[in-house]
Image (spheres, rainbow, N blue to C red):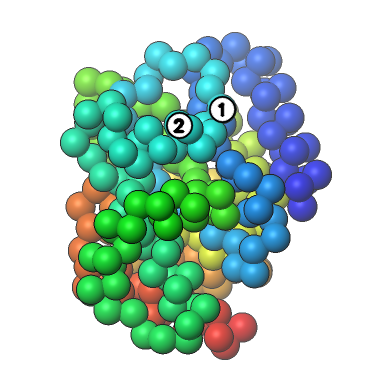
Amino acid sequence: MQKEFKHAREKTKELIEAEKIKHHMFYGPTSKSYWTQKNKVLFINEEPYGYEDCGVVDVDKETLLGWFYDKGNTKTKTVKYSIAFIKVLLDSLQNDQEPNRSDLRTAYYANQELENILDKIAYYNIRSTSNNKKREDYNAIVASGNNVISQNIYMEIKALNPDIIIIGGDAARKAFNSMSNLYIDYKSCIKSENAIIQSIKHPSIPNYNDYIDAIKTITKKIKKS
């Protein structure tokens, strides 16, 4: 699927050029390791805070680490909690053990292990850029699911061929529903084609109980598939 993803990315670049879109952030795997994972995980959040006039940017591992450690001093731990969620999920699948709240707390502080996970997953913000004067622009995030570029973004997501898609936040869920023509209830889990798709509370305001329940749901569906 690497070729399909590369092709989808080129189509997005062509559209950006044709539409004269000046600001866009490209997301995707930061390493070829993603393509060899037993369970390929894609985490989709809402928007990158403070990147409205960023130009055209490739979000690489260095960029994600900057967000992970909040080098921009935005006071958000969205990326770190997202990766901690993935770590507990992958550990649960690998060890065949039910997770608990303490696993999330431990994972959150395991910085090196979380950094390593960045090489194995794909991370997206469904709204490519954001308004640096309005944190969580709910309506703009929802609208990103039905704009000139949304179908290209969805083609990139499909080309990633993820086994598990985590969608953080209600606005991202609504945008994803629009671009995918699927319907996922907030905090629910469905299986569509080869992917298990789980909606969760946005990682900027994590709920440990909800997260553990979501991880348990995903692992059960993985085992049944």
Q: Secondary structure at mark 2?
A: helix
Q: Which residue is mark 1?
A: 58
Q: CA distance from mark 2 to mark 1?
A: 9 Å
The relative height of residue 67 versus residue 113 in the rendered view (above or below) is above
The relative height of residue 9 versus residue 55 in the rendered view (above or below) is below
Relative depth, front residue between 95 and 56: 95
Between disc 2 and disc 1, whose residue precedes? 1
Q: Rate crowding at label 1 as few (under 14), some (14 to 19) or many (20 or more) other CA atoms within 10 Å.
A: few
The relative height of residue 117 versus residue 69 in the rendered view (above or below) is below
Q: Position of residue 14 (x, y in %)?
A: 71, 22
In front: mark 2 or mark 1?
Answer: 2
Relative depth, front residue between 23 and 206: 206
Q: Would you say residue 202 is visible in this rendering?
A: no
Q: Are marks 2 and 1 in contact (CB under 8 Å)?
A: yes
At x 44%, y 49%, the residue is: 115
Amino acid type of the residue that numbered disc 2 sits on in the rendered structure: Thr
Q: Rate crowding at label 2 as few (under 14), some (14 to 19) or many (20 or more) other CA atoms within 10 Å.
A: few
Side of 104 where 11 appears, left or right: right
Give the image quarter of residue 29: top right
Q: How many marks?
A: 2
Residue lying furthest right: 3
Q: Would you say residue 58 is visible in this rendering?
A: yes
Q: Position of residue 43 (x, y in %)?
A: 47, 53
Q: Position of residue 224 (x, y in %)?
A: 57, 88
Side of 219 where 161 appears, left or right: right
At x 38%, y 74%, the residue is: 215
Q: Which residue is mark 2?
A: 63
Side of 18 where 3 appears, left or right: right
Amino acid type of the residue that numbered disc 1 sits on in the rendered structure: Asp
